[in-house]
Image: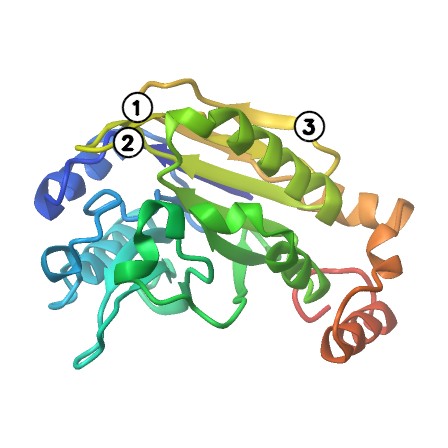
């Protein structure tokens, strides 16, 4: 199973230009059927709270993600702003399309970044989501997350206890706290014994500077691949077999205690059924 993390300089509130930049960066990348392409948070606009301008009202961004998935024959996860009719606030979503163009997951960012005034324009989601990635005869359960979610480990733990083996996070994480970005991604991988894929933007917007640092981390905290501050695509093999073997050899997740009864029951059910992938 292979993933491709698209680290891009996002054009401020310019949907068409950002679509073109994604296509340019992926041109020539060896994306194979069933691969996974991960785009940053709000890849179509940048981290803007001007939701009247950036919301995907006509589904233009959704249509782009669908076309991209179909053209590449890959799963695609990309961030967009969604505002329902009559809703005072929008949602910051990670949207996932299958190689057939089917919508397989919509995750709404649970933790709006109040320090950056995101909570003034965006409402937090209420559900941890997972989706099944199938590629080359293998399958894995993926838990999506968005930027500031990274600071809240309970989201990732709930995903892990539901069987997630891969955590896919898109971000607009600023230069000022770049050290936290890397440290927290490694921590989420180690504590949940899974692969963490973190894609960040680069460049700048009217308010902040970004220096990328997109990274893929293995289940023991090892670096599978990493980018600097330039635009580019990080392509990595995702070692699902190693995740399962490490969880079998060092079964730390079974000792989790600070969880609700529903999650505890899910863990017990999964253990009785074996340590495979989704619903295994």
The numbered mark, 2 or 1, whose residue comes first in the sequence reads 2
Front position in the image: 204 or 44: 204
Cα gap from disc 2 to disc 1, whole angstroms: 5 Å
Vertical order, 18 against 271 (above or below) = above
**Residue, disc 3:** 222
Rendering coords of residue 268 (x, y %): 84, 73
**Residue, disc 1:** 231
The numbered mark, 3 or 1, whose residue comes first in the sequence reads 3
Q: Residues within 10 Å of mark 1 (few under 14, many from 20)?
A: some
Cα gap from disc 3 to disc 2, whole angstroms: 24 Å
| Residue 9 in sight here | yes
For the residue labelled by badge 2, is the local secondary structure a helix, a strand or a loop? loop
Which quadrant holds the C terminus? bottom right
Hey, which quadrant is residue 54 in on the image? bottom left
Which residue corresponds to the image point at 39% horizontal and 25% vertical from the top-left? 175
Q: Are marks 2 and 1 in contact (CB under 8 Å)?
A: yes
**Residue, disc 2:** 8
For the residue labelled by badge 1, is the local secondary structure a helix, a strand or a loop? loop
Q: Residues within 10 Å of mark 3 (few under 14, many from 20)?
A: few
Q: Are marks 3 and 1 in contact (CB under 8 Å)?
A: no
Which residue corresponds to the image point at 53% horizontal and 46% vertical from the top-left? 150
Which quadrant holds the N terminus? top right
Q: Are marks 3 and 2 in contact (CB under 8 Å)?
A: no
Rendering coords of residue 165 (x, y %): 65, 53
Hey, which quadrant is residue 176 in on the image? top left
Using the image, tell me which numbered label, if any, was put on residue 151. Answer: none
Hey, which quadrant is residue 260 in on the image? bottom right
Left or right of 194 in this view: 121:
left
Which residue corresponds to the image point at 26% horizontal and 44% vertical from the top-left? 47
The numbered mark, 3 or 2, whose residue comes first in the sequence reads 2
């Amino acid at each position: 199973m292979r993933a491709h993390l698209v680290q891009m300089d996002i054009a401020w509130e310019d949907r068409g230009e950002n679509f073109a930049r994604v296509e340019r960066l992926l041109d020539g990348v060896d994306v194979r059927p069933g691969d996974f392409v991960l785009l940053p948070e709000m890849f179509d606009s940048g981290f803007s709270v001007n939701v009247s301008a950036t919301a995907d009202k006509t589904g233009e961004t959704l249509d782009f993600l669908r076309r991209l998935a179909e053209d590449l024959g890959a799963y695609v996860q990309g961030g967009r702003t969604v505002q329902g009719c009559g809703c005072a606030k929008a949602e910051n979503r990670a949207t996932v399309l299958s190689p057939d163009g089917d919508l397989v997951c919509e995750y709404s960012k649970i933790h709006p970044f109040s320090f950056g005034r995101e909570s003034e324009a965006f409402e937090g989601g209420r559900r941890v989501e997972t989706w099944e990635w199938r590629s080359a005869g293998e399958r894995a359960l993926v838990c999506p997350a968005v930027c500031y979610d990274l600071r809240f480990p309970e989201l990732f733990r709930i995903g892990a206890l539901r069987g997630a083996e891969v955590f896919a996070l898109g971000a607009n994480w600023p230069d000022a706290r770049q050290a936290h970005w890397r440290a927290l991604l490694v921590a989420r991988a180690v504590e949940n014994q899974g692969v963490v894929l973190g894609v960040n933007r680069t460049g700048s917007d009217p308010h902040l500077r970004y220096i990328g640092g997109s990274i893929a981390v293995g289940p023991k905290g090892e670096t599978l691949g990493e980018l600097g501050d330039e635009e580019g695509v990080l392509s990595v093999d995702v070692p699902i077999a190693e995740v399962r073997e490490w969880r079998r050899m060092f079964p730390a997740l079974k000792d989790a205690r600070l969880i609700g009864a529903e999650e505890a029951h899910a863990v017990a059910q999964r253990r009785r059924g074996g340590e495979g992938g989704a619903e295994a």
